[in-house]
Amino acid sequence: MNGIMDQKYFQGIDHSEKVSLTLPTHAVEYDFDVRFDQNSVSYGANLLWAKSGEPLSGLGYVMRSESTDQGNNDFSLILRRLESSGEGPALEITTRSSKETNALKIEVTHPTDTSRQMTIEVSLFCII
């Protein structure tokens, strides 16, 4: 095994967990999910908090990494603010690499204000 994250060892694992803590003045909730498939791994988690009696809000993330036998690798990371009214602004970073190209995409989205959105894409091509 090459390390703790060796996908052959963890293949087929799908695990979720949720922990809630309620105090007299505040509430905190944490949930996460991890999934290992043959060529990919994904993680996701949310951390929410609020004063007692108020709606929970917080932060969440999703990370996914995938590799193929042909040498292609994809990676994505999404960070999002979670609000009681729904999902808030998000930052998404995606990379793709193969023998021919390497690409990076950074995207900022906002659910209601399009003036606060942005996308940057960069691609490098390898000519052999």
Image: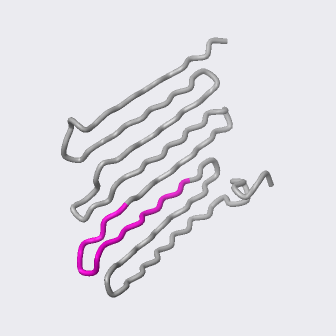
Along the viewing direction, whichever of 7 and 109 lies nearer the viewer: 109
Find out whether residue 2 is within the magenta segment.
no
Q: Is residue 100 left or right of residue 93?
A: right
Q: Quadrant of residue 115?
A: top left
**Placement of 8 over or under 114, stated as above or below:** below
User: Which residue is drawn at the image coordinates 41% and 66% (left, top)?
Assistant: 47
Q: Main secondary structure of the magenta part?
A: strand
The range drawn in magenta is 42-58
Report the quarter where the C terminus lies. top right
User: Which residue is drawn at the image coordinates 19% and 46% (left, top)?
Assistant: 112
Q: Pinpoint residue 37: horizontal percent, then vertical percent.
A: 61, 54
Q: Residue furthest front?
A: 25
Q: Pinpoint residue 4: horizontal percent, then vertical percent.
A: 73, 58
Q: Quadrant of residue 113?
A: top left
Q: Is residue 50 left or right of residue 45?
A: left
User: Which residue is drawn at the image coordinates 58% and 30% (left, top)?
Assistant: 97
Total labels: the figure holds: 0
Along the viewing direction, whichever of 52 and 113 lies nearer the viewer: 52
Q: Residue furthest bottom?
A: 24
**Placement of 75 over or under 36, stated as above or below:** above
Q: Quadrant of residue 21?
A: bottom left
Q: Which color mode does the image show?
A: one colour
User: Which residue is drawn at the image coordinates 30% and 70% (left, top)?
Assistant: 56
Q: Residue furthest top?
A: 128
Q: Pinpoint residue 111: horizontal percent, then vertical percent.
A: 23, 47
Q: Pinpoint residue 64: horizontal percent, then vertical percent.
A: 53, 49
Report the quarter where the N terminus lies. bottom right
Along the viewing direction, whichever of 82 and 96 lies nearer the viewer: 82
